[in-house]
Image (tube, coloured by chain):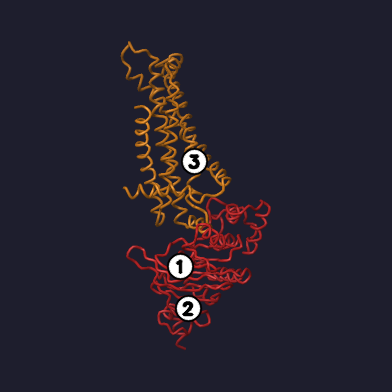
Chain colours: A orange, B red
Amino acid sequence: MITRVGKFVFFFAGLFRNRERFSVYVNLVFEECILIGIDSIFIVAIVSTFIGGVTAIQTAHSLVSPLVPLYMIGLITRDMTVLELAPTFTGVILAGKIGSSIAGNLGTMRITEQIDALEVMGINASSYLVLPKIIAGMLMFPLLTILSGVLCLYGGYLAGTLTEIITAEEYVRGIRFQFDGYNVMFAVIKAVVFGFLITSVSAYQGFFTRGGSLEVGKASTDAVKNSCIAVLIGDFVVAQLLMA
Amino acid sequence: MIEVKNINKSFKEKHVLQDVNAILEKGKSNLIIGASGTGKSVLLKTIIGLNKPDTGAILYNGKDFINGTEDEIKSIRREMGVLFQGSALFDSKNVEQNVMFPLDALTHMGKEEKLDRVNFCLQRVGLENVNKLFPSEISGGMQKRVGIARAIVMNPQFLFCDEPNSGLDPLTSIRIDNLIAEITQEYKTTTVVVTHDMNSVMEIGDKVIFMYKGKKLWEGDNKTILNSGVEELDNFVFANKLLRKLKSI
């Protein structure tokens, strides 16, 4: 474990050595932003809308006391989704989608000697291939998390009003009640951390793949597993640091 | 010219290269031959810097490639062109982008100039009207030729080819061999080819190095290889019954 962490640290440090021209990275980051961000909008949107809806319905189901005002459904949905569900669920979904894609892509490049081809040309392959993915991850994850938060709230609104457990006015009153902007900032910070963890852990798994197609598959699976674990640990650490 | 001096390389307990010395000459096709598992690919990867040797030195035109400064190593790397066994073309890029890649990454050439150079190299390897095709859309032989075009696009002094004929039919193999030989003559490159194909040896082997169990066992050319008098090399060269029969005649 310690060896692996040490190897990861060296791998990460290597991203900043012997880099290419700045303009090379601009194009690569842009391409990665499309792959990581734009191509993930659909899955994030679907999942977030349903999570918001389910959160609102389950919250309503739990509120049995007539003394608790109905707008609390909106408030609880807001706090649960913005603080935890939007960033963490988005992180776990993207660990699966982006993590496996990054590890599979780099693993295939490794076993087909494409990474060797880059290194022979004098290009720092890890910096060229991995750094743009990490930067794009750290840029796009917050945007996807904000989108997720908005759609969670909208999903709650739809579920609440369509099933008539709450009126639109009560729900909107709930999500506006004692709103603290810091919570959004907190979610964005979490998303930046998750973006870094998922892209770097998955890239590490893929970059050091050895063998054949079987090992590429294993690297992808390990990337998803380790990224999910990293997201959960990161979630705990960020919560402890920013809220304790 | 490339000088290989006392190279040793081990992977864990296995001593893969043992005191290998060789001079790879300019303007010649230098072939490293040997059976599978004799260390020829490891030697090539060590020469091009993908493996670091445990001991020894690699000199490119007298410059130390192993222990040089980062800038020295980088300047040597920019004089290298490598054709990998599986061509190693970038899947996500089309033929034109693959060949243009070194120019994009390592030069400040304008777009027109780069395109002219790419088209020149593709024409030189006998490929036309394939610029927009992706590697998965062309045959293995064409992929090799695109790999050669990418290897020569920077006009390198040193050209390395790892098993350029693997997976190709005999006729295409000879075409690829001849292309490598022509480029070597034309650009006076120091060309190093790793192969176990005797057709290649007889076709383009200006200089031949025979590897056996991690050691250099014999050195010569395609004119002397048939009468080397080295048993292990004879076993490799005359591997099939027909050739053994012909030799006995």
Label 3 and label 1: CA atoms lie apart by 38 Å
Residue extending furthest toward the top: A67
First along the sequence among labels 2 and 1: 1
Residue B23 at x, y percent in the picture: 50, 74
Which chain is mark 3 on? Answer: A
Mark 1: which amino acid? Ala
Residue extending furthest toward the bottom: B249
> Is B227 above or below relative to B62?
below
Residue A135, numbered circle? 3
Which chain is mark 1 on? Answer: B
Q: Secondary structure at mark 2?
A: strand
Label 2 and label 1: CA atoms lie apart by 19 Å
Tally of numbered tags: 3
Residue B200 or residue A122, whichever sits in front: A122
Image point (49%, 81%), residue name: B225
Mark 3: which amino acid? Ile
Residue B219, numbered circle? 2
Q: Residues within 10 Å of mark 2 (few under 14, many from 20)?
A: some
Residue B197 at x, y percent in the picture: 49, 72
- The residue that disc 1 covers is B57
The reply to whether label 3 and label 1 mark residues of one chain is no
The quarter holding residue B144 reads: bottom right
Residue A90 or residue B30, whichever sits in front: B30
Residue B187, numbered circle? none
Of circles 3 and 1, the one toward us is 1
Residue A30 or residue B175, whichever sits in front: A30
Label 3 and label 2: CA atoms lie apart by 51 Å
Image point (52%, 39%), residue name: A33
The reply to whether label 2 and label 1 mark residues of one chain is yes
